Amino acid sequence: MIGSRRKIAVGLKYFWLNFLTKNGQIRALKWLSKADKLRITQHFNASIGSFRKVLLILPEKPYDLVLTQKSVIALKQHHPDMIVEVIAENANKDIIKSNPFIDGGLIYNRREFFYHHPAFRELIYSLKGRRYDACFLFNRDEHPLHFFLMANSGAPLRVAFTGSDAAPFVNLAVRPRKETEYEGDRYESLLRTLGVKVGSARLRWNIARSSEKDVEALLIQFGLRIDRPLIGIDVSPSVYDKGFPPELLKGLIDTLVAEDRAEIILFYSREQDREQMKSFSFLNRAIVPIPEDKISFATAFINKCSLIIALNNLVYQLGIMLGRPTVGLFENAESRQWICVAPGKFESVCAPRLKNLSLEEILSRVKSLMPLQA
């Protein structure tokens, strides 16, 4: 009997992973979760001031997750007594632990994130033991199982970026205005729909003193003077896997070193780029790993830098959120979606292709944010 059940489970898993489309999975999950009954049995209250406990399902991609953190803070500032819990992917747990405005939540592993996996079933079981007034899906690349999590949260109000295909999992679908193009504004529009204002204050995460000491030790290890201004250049690819042009990087380093403006440190933030970093060996400079899943360390490092230069990636978004002087390098096609236009010490340089970026223009932006010391 047990063997037959196991064969059935394996068969269902194979069919689920290989044949069902996203819409097919959503239809199957509607039946499995009895989600159609939610519309009949639940009525939601859109007055967020009366909410006592909310659940946020956060993005898996670190650069998206960083952009959502101001929304988390806005919720607590709007209603300080509200309990804010999250569901997040395991690789991002350091970001969650570092945010003092998050009261708890559940962690999952993306390798176990499918319906028939025992770990996912355990996640659902844990979720059913909690009751929420509202559930927000902060994920624009939502997985069908994210809707299933919403249905099992017990929240009468379920808010997401989606259309009719996900009904009745979602009963308040938000469609950002056409002029809302910056990704950070899109996430914030989920809360603005309910009257929550998202301020312009920079992020203030809990940073362990050990992280700050580790950064200082790292800088000394690579022969850098910690009493001088520091320019950090992230040579990791962009979110679209466009690489940093080698000739542009060489010209940037040569000029900054010749001007003796500051100490220069090269780093990369994605572990999968370790091999690719060898292509910059002609620079005869060590390239330091700053792991994106160690957000406390990355934050302490960025706070130590007088200026950050990066492509469109996690480090650019993190520098913006921390309010640090940041120069972002973009292709024209991605600029409106990712460049932050909020007031602050932020500059950006755009071109049709990254290889067409102007070295002179980048240096001009650097000088505007970090003038030479008298």
Image (tube, helix red, strand yellow):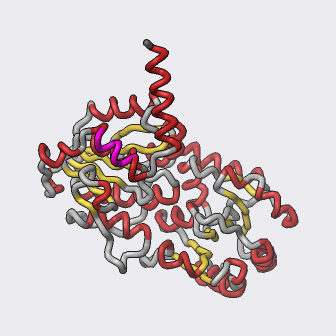
Query: Which quarter of the image is occupied by the C terminus?
Result: bottom right
Which residue corresponds to the image point at 36% horizontal and 39% vertical from the top-left?
105
Up-down relation of residue 358 to residue 132 (above or below): below
Answer with left or right where residue 105 lies relative to residue 273: left
Q: Along the line of sight, which residue is nearer the eye, 222 or 39?
A: 39
Q: Quadrant of residue 230?
A: bottom right
Which residue corresponds to the image point at 46% horizontal and 38% vertical from the top-left?
114
Q: Position of residue 130 (x, y in %)?
A: 26, 35
Q: Along the line of sight, which residue is nearer the eye, 96 or 189?
A: 189
Q: Residue furthest top?
A: 1
Numbered label tally = 0
Answer with left or right where residue 275 lies relative to residue 1: right
Which portion, as a residue range, is magenta?
25-31
Decide whether residue 30 is among the magenta residues.
Answer: yes
Up-down relation of residue 237 to residue 275 (above or below): below
Which residue corresponds to the image point at 30% horizontal and 62% vertical from the top-left?
163
The secondary structure that most of the magenta stretch takes on is helix
Q: Quadrant of residue 174?
A: bottom left
Up-down relation of residue 336 to residue 283 (above or below): below
